[in-house]
Image (tube, grey):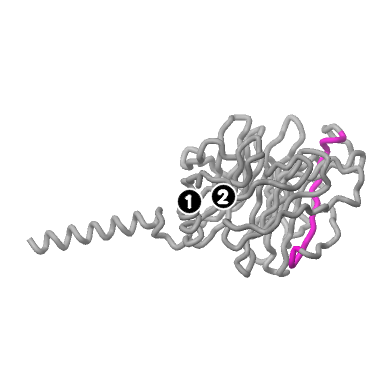
Amino acid sequence: MLKSKLISSFRLAIIGLLCCGLTSCSKQAYLFTSFHEPATEGLRLLYSYDAYHWTDLNKTFLKPAVGTQKVLRDPSIVQGPDGTFHLVWTCSWKGDKGFGYASSKDLIHWSAQQFLPVMENEPKTVNVWAPEIFYDDEKKEFVIIWASTIPFRFAKGIEEEENNHRMYSVTTKDFITFSQPKLFLDPGFSVIDAVIVKRATKDYVLVLKDNTRPNRNLKVAFARSALGPYKNVSETFSPKLTEGPTVVKTGKDWLIYFDAYGQKIYSAYKTTDFKSFKDVTSEVSIPEGHKHGTIIKVKNKVIQDLLKSR
């Protein structure tokens, strides 16, 4: 009888440990910034304990208040070394020469929103799209990259002049002073939605969208520093009509999530080397209505506090 009880208790303990790996027992969690169309309500957040199965917190955490159109699209977030979260986003389709920015210690209470006019010295700028923020722990600075069109600045290619994007960048250590904007990437075609991934010291990958028609799909490039230069742009690894990639590491794998808008699904591919890719869309679950943002790892306490705030 005693032996039977011991075996039963042992089994329950093992089951409990296994469950904890996918639940709030985990010390590690994942946060996915999100928005719903038409992007006027504001920042949404998803959470996960395994980076495959996501739950919407069903709340907007930051209502857009800057920019001509006052939308919050393409929200990108990073947590700095002091624990502060920094968020940037697209605040207008066209007409603005900058993007939105706000910070928070807990993702519940936010600083006043700012409009960062990064392209103000380029009067012919058509748009500032999908700013992506990255913390460069080698240079101890934040890097923000985005896509803009400056008509007749680059070789025409396939795209119309007002859709011939290139990637630009600024750096900052304190979000008070910023470097002068620089051309970040000119791959010879219209490019948007780029995200920086650090694999190791002096080993970086850029996942980007080739925005030329009929392509409009994802590729990768490689560099020895966060700011590049990024070289060896690959062939595409995604279907046509895909955008908004974000990347997270789980074990030995890198998961690349993206909006497969041509198929009207949210998709995920898995890779270990950014050379071969496996479609794992059937293995992930994404709440309906989710639109692309970025994924970061956070302490479980962050998620628990967000759950309590609803």
Q: Residues within 10 Å of mark 2 (few under 14, many from 20)?
A: many
Region in magenta: 161-175
Residue 93 visible somewhere in the drawing: yes
Please, what is the three-letter code of the amino acid marked with disc 1?
Answer: Ser
Query: Quick one: 310 or 194, which is closer to the camera?
Result: 310
Q: Residue at x 76, y 59 (%)?
A: 227
Looking at the rendered image, the quarter that the N terminus falls into is bottom left
Question: Where is 299 relative to 233, above or below?
Answer: below
Count of labels in the image = 2
Q: Which mark is residue 48?
A: 1
Residue under the image location 82 percent in, 36 percent down: 163
Quarter-wise, where is residue 189 in the image? top right
User: From where the camera sits, is residue 188 visible?
Assistant: no
Q: Which residue is mark 2?
A: 32
Position of residue 163 in the picture relative to residue 255 (left or right)? right
Residue 42, given in percent of the width and then of the height, sits at 63, 44
The answer to whether residue 60 is magenta is: no
> Where does the image place residue 55, in percent across and percent down from the top left?
48, 45
Residue 174 colored magenta? yes
Q: Measure the C-alpha gap from mark 2 to mark 1.
A: 8 Å
